[in-house]
């Protein structure tokens, strides 16, 4: 393997995310900076860095989990272990995905779900690929201006309350993907989730903290408080959380497939809750819901094949468009974490998000989207010519801005011993979705209707937009940023990646690809590496605090970039296929305390 090239203006200790800030005099002369850095590194060593400079957060040694068998990497240890057990029982990657997804609907309630939706990407070992769209839909009574009151935007309707709930898609989507690629019986894949809901599981430290924080938002909904507290008192770490109503709902799904959710008792319970509180979803809406199998979007980057999900997700298009643009630069020479590489990547992000707002929506309602153009190398080249290598572009608030999309999604990656692979991202939207548990059914409902644009012609500097492609209409799927993605090289699986994080999903996933391909990081280094995000408007680079050195930040400001530190971006759970050693390497995102890589060995 070639030596990794790091930034000349910010030096990360190999395998860690610690940076060594150079003296200002060295910043002014790149060659002097390199010489000074190498000399000081040799003579003083890392001990001096720890003693004389402000330390940054340091991960443990960045070695991935490795196995020659199969692997499940998710944000939840119980979910990962359930999936690995299915692989051990003879299931394939799709079987393990279904079991993990249902288990996380029990053990990871902030995002794991049966009341939400998402996207799944499957690549068989022989290279055949399918994409599954189970994004939520607007109910039949939805209108483009349903989030307005007296012609003005009403946030209490958009992301909150019963009007914010879209028709769920998860159960239909998982069943369709299983029907086409699963090998074990459906009931066998749902059974672990039933047992976890019925018998309970120990609440982790992270989940206890999360539930305690969520209880305030659940106060208007008695069934939610009953589900996720002990008579209103928060669960403590180590206590057992049982969800008997959810267990019975899962039993109906196990016995009857999608009909056990979209018809019968569960559908009646959803409709009753909606009708009692001004919601729009009816049993007719539920019965009419269909998940869709769509062709993945495809691209190439430096000899790697890129597979991702198509609209109504904007993720695949955004990633491939950015990669096409960046292929014209030598990012390796610029250096990982350097001001120049961050500048170029951020400018690519800026342009892909501008196209996202202008063109992308539900393809069933926007048949004239210029997808071939957006995915083309020519378009990437044309965008590249608009980038000044020295100065930042300026985003105009009169052109594009975006509706809010939540960071509380979850992603996981699965590869079996035959190297069939699944990348799946699904969500309730906000953490715990609408915070509404369906009484008697035991599951949370999404608040995905807030991903539609707020209203016709309504565009403001604060983040609302009223362009046509993503206005709410009956039966329409709302725009998404979810980006489950798979890479291959020379016909063999290379990488399974994706992340939660709302609109940052696209750019977090993009960065995992760049880190693996351009900078040749291993799986754990990829997920440990610092992240940043630009989305056209607001015109700012958001970056993980303490992951970019002070001198690099100064250089970016000198180029004209606005900068804003954030605590965390995304939670990428990835798998890299190390072909030479016939080994899978799992990168567990330690930003998520319960994340875990489970293997069959």
Image: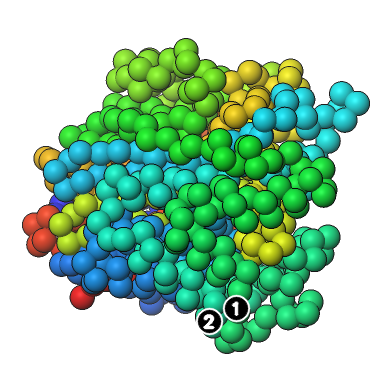
Mark 2: few/some/many CA within 10 Å (<14, 14-19, 20+): some
- Inter-mark Cα distance, 2 to 1: 6 Å
Residue 36, image x and y in percent? 33, 56
| Residue occupying image coordinates x 54% and y 57% | 113
Residue nearer the viewer, 70 or 567:
70
Which quadrant would residue 541 be assigned to in this image? top right
Seen in the picture, residue 109 relative to 577 is either above or below; the reply is below
Outermost residue toward the left?
Answer: 580
Which quadrant is home to the C terminus?
A: bottom left
**In this rendering, does residue 417 appear at all?**
yes
Residue in the image at 48% along x and 49% along y: 258
Report whether 483 appears left or right of 145: left
Provide residue 114's location: percent of width, then percent of height. Answer: 54, 55
Q: Position of residue 520 (x, y in %)?
A: 24, 51
Where is mark 2, residue-wise?
Answer: 199
Closer to us: 354 or 415: 415
Q: Is mark 2 on a helix, strand or loop?
A: helix
- The residue shown at (72%, 62%) is 439
In terms of sequence position, does the residue under pointer 2 or pointer 1 come before the other?
2
Do labels 2 and 1 touch, CB within 8 Å?
Answer: yes
**Residue 293, label in figure:** none
Judge left or right: residue 453 versus residue 421: right
The kind of secondary structure element at disc 1 is loop
Disc 1 crowd rating (10 Å Cα; few below 14, some 14-19, many 20+) is some
Check the picture and name the quadrant holding the N terminus. bottom left
Identity of the residue furthest to the right in this view? 150
Give the residue number, with chain letter if any, for mark 1.
242
């Amino acid at each position: 393997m070639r030596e990794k090239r790091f930034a000349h203006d910010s030096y990360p200790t190999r395998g860690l995310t610690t940076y060594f800030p150079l003296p200002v005099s060295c910043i002014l002369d790149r060659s002097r900076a390199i010489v000074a850095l190498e000399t000081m590194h040799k003579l003083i060593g890392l001990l001096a860095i720890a003693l004389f400079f402000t330390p940054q957060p340091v991960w443990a040694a960045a070695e991935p989990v490795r196995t020659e068998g199969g692997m499940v990497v998710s944000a939840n240890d119980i979910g990962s272990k359930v999936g690995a057990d299915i692989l051990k029982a003879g299931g394939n990657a799709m079987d393990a995905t279904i079991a993990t997804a249902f288990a996380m609907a029990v053990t990871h309630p902030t995002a794991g779900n049966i009341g939400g939706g998402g996207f799944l990407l499957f690549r068989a070992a022989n290279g055949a690929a399918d994409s599954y769209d189970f994004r939520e839909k607007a109910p039949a009574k939805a209108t483009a201006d349903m989030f307005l009151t007296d012609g003005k935007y009403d946030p209490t309707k958009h992301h909150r309350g019963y009007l914010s709930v879209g028709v769920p898609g998860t159960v239909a989507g998982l069943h369709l993907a299983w029907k086409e690629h699963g090998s074990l019986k459906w009931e066998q894949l749902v059974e672990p989730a039933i047992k976890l809901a019925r018998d309970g599981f120990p609440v982790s430290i992270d989940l206890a903290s999360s539930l305690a924080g969520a209880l305030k938002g659940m106060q208007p909904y008695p069934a939610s408080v009953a589900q996720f507290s002990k008579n209103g008192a928060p669960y403590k770490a180590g206590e057992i959380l049982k969800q008997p109503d959810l267990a019975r709902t899962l039993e109906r799904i196990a016995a009857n497939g999608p009909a056990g959710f979209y018809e019968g008792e569960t559908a009646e319970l959803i409709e009753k809750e909606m009708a009692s509180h001004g919601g729009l979803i009816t049993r007719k809406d539920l019965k009419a819901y269909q998940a869709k199998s769509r062709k993945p979007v495809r691209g190439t980057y430096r000899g790697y094949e890129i597979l991702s999900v198509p609209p109504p997700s904007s993720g695949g298009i955004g990633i491939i468009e950015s990669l096409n643009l960046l292929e014209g630069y030598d990012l390796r020479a610029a250096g990982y974490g350097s001001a120049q590489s961050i500048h170029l990547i951020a400018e690519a992000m800026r342009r892909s998000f501008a196209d996202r707002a202008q063109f992308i929506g539900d393809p069933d309602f926007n048949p004239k989207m210029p997808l071939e153009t957006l995915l083309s190398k020519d378009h990437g080249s044309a965008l590249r010519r608009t980038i000044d290598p020295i100065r930042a572009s300026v985003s105009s608030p009169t052109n594009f801005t975006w509706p809010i999309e939540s960071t509380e999604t979850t992603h996981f990656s699965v590869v079996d011993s035959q190297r069939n692979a699944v990348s799946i991202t699904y969500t309730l939207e906000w953490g715990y979705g609408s915070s509404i548990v369906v009484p008697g059914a035991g599951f949370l409902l999404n608040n995905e209707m807030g991903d539609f644009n707020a209203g016709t012609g309504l565009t403001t500097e604060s983040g609302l937009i009223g362009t046509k492609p993503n206005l709410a209409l009956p039966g329409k799927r709302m725009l998404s940023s979810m980006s489950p993605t798979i890479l291959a090289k020379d016909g063999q699986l290379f990488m399974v990646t994706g992340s939660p994080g709302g609109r940052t999903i696209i750019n977090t996933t993009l960065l995992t690809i760049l880190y693996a391909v351009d900078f040749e990081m291993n799986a754990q280094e990829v997920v440990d590496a610092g992240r940043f995000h630009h989305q056209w408007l607001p015109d700012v680079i958001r970056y993980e605090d303490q992951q970019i050195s002070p001198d690099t930040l100064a250089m970016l400001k000198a180029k004209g970039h606005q900068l804003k530190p954030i605590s965390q971006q995304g939670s990428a759970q990835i798998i890299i296929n190390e072909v030479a050693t016939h080994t899978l390497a799992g990168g567990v995102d330690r930003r998520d305390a319960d994340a875990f890589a489970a293997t069959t060995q």
